[in-house]
Image: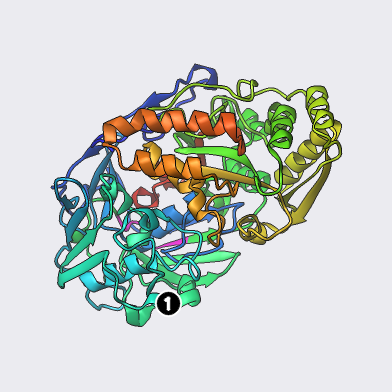
Amino acid sequence: MASAMAACSVLPGGSSDDESPATRRVSTYDEAQDAKAKAPAPEVPDARSGGTLHVLSSATPHTFDPTRVYHLDTLAIMRMVTRGLTQTRYVKGKPVLVPDLATDLGRPNADFTRWEFTLRDGLKYEDGSPVKAADVAYAIKRQLAQDELSGGPTYGLDYYLGGDTYKGPYKSGDDFEGVETPDEKTIVVKMRKPFPSMRYYTSLPTFSPIPKSKDTREDYSNHPLATGPYKFGSYDPGKKLVLVKNPEWDPKTDPNRHQYVDQMVFDFGLDTDEVQRRVIADNAEDQTALTYSNILASNYDHIRGTDARRRLVVGPSPCSSYMWMDTRKIPLAVRRAVAKAWPLSSENRAGGEIPGLTWRPATTIMPSATPGWQNFDVIGNKGEGDGDPAAAKKMLTDAGQLGFELSFYYSSDDENEAKIAAVRKKALTRAGFTVKAIPAPSSLARDLADDSIRPANLRDGSWCMDWASGDSVLPAILDGKKADLPGAPVPSFLDVPAVNDEIDRISDLPAQKALNAWGQLDKTIMEKYLPAVPLGESGTTVMHGSRVGNVIIDSVGGMPDFSQIYVR
């Protein structure tokens, strides 16, 4: 990938301006790099220390293990607790890749098959012990323990030297040829093919150092060892997380993060509409609260033209949403009928989406701001509308599949999820399918969707670019060599040798030549195999209370940057 990183933006860096959604345009930005960014981070004007930030969420994280976290919310939370080798900082509203635990952005060899990083001086864990290169190396080895630690990034399987055979430290031991630590400060990562995007990959929490002696395996999620400004104070899985200040974090080692609030209290699994109404009302404790669940259309209409509208921060998201179809269970002819019948407009209305603000139409797997993206529409719906149930029923009849059973999970304790499920069931039934909508509590929804042996043959999902290039999209979610891995990293389970081989071929191309090749492969996959119905590209909105200051949308992560927030 080239040194510039592009992503989809509505309002770069986030905005509270009362701009009509209809006037917003998709734009792109270039992510600059500053290998010499100085620490500590510049102070936020007028910021105050102290107080408690309350974060109200309808989602329920299923893990806080840094090796496994891979949803936007857990990534954003863990960036306050753990630190990677690199990170993104915002300068005048624009993202800039800067060092984190490392002294620079990494030093590659000429063909990007060897990367060297050096740790800063003065790095400590929450218990006061020093951070060592061996701890980063252990975290890298841990990334490959897919049988035990599924669901996280899988780039190492593709790129690390020996990553295709090494099974992580639990099964394969410590001897891994892909990483070396010549001294206590130096990490050398070796690749079996060029990986120019490595410096972006190292910004993820999966590169957070973990001392081997402190690895409690499945229990590590309950209290990961902190290197960031906050540490776990208490955690009730599925319900509440309290982050408190980490006294061992030294701002002189960190060019981006702050430690303004005394604690952050996250409440999970709440009703979307209820928490938005609470924050809009701005009473008592909710004056120091925010919710990152995208604002519903009904609540947006309620605040339009009021002072509360100034407390809605609007920003970009790197994400696209899909309905993945299990290609092992649903024949291609049936998949085409599913796509023809899909009720995009009705489900968006039911879910409270706001066109141009929280949702934009999509017809491709790759987000439209990805370099090399191609504009095509295989389904023929322009990414919107309510499909053609009569045509879909004829397609099923012609294929001898009338009455084909479709099944999917939905969060039964979220009113909007239930509404969307009802819309889908009604539309698909009209099109000649037998539909089984399976209710599940939100605390289990993510795990159930990621379980490859569960009965559902449709899977709601979204993919958010780790960096804006096709190599952070198609290999991650459509490489059939990973289709059988735990955690369903390939949610369509598409495993076609021609596609897998083409992914490998493009991955070996020089970065600039690969850009257009990824776009062409996207088109080929949709035309020949149709593994998903694109549901749209998203924006990000954050509603906050009147005493919450400096809410900035991380346009790379599609979430608020908690490290910049203070309480008035």
CA neighbours of label 1 inside 10 A, class few (<14), some (14 to 19), many (20+): few
For the N terminus, give its image quadrant: top left
Position in image of residue 383 (x %, y %): 61, 25
Q: Is residue 402 magenta?
A: no
Which sits in the foreground, 290 or 526? 526
- Residue at 85 percent across and 31 percent down: it is 430
Position in image of residue 422 (x %, y %): 80, 40
Q: Quadrant of residue 93?
A: top left
Q: Is residue 42 left or right of residue 84?
A: left
- Residue at 81 percent across and 48 percent down: it is 436
Position in image of residue 146 (x %, y %): 47, 65
- Residue at 42 percent across and 27 percent down: it is 373
Which sits in the foreground, 420 or 237? 420
Q: Is residue 36 left or right of residue 124?
A: left
Colour scheme in use: rainbow
Q: Is residue 262 magenta?
A: yes
- Residue at 59 percent across and 45 percent down: it is 461
Q: Is residue 554 left or right of residue 272?
A: left
Residue stretch rendered in magenta on the structure:
258-264
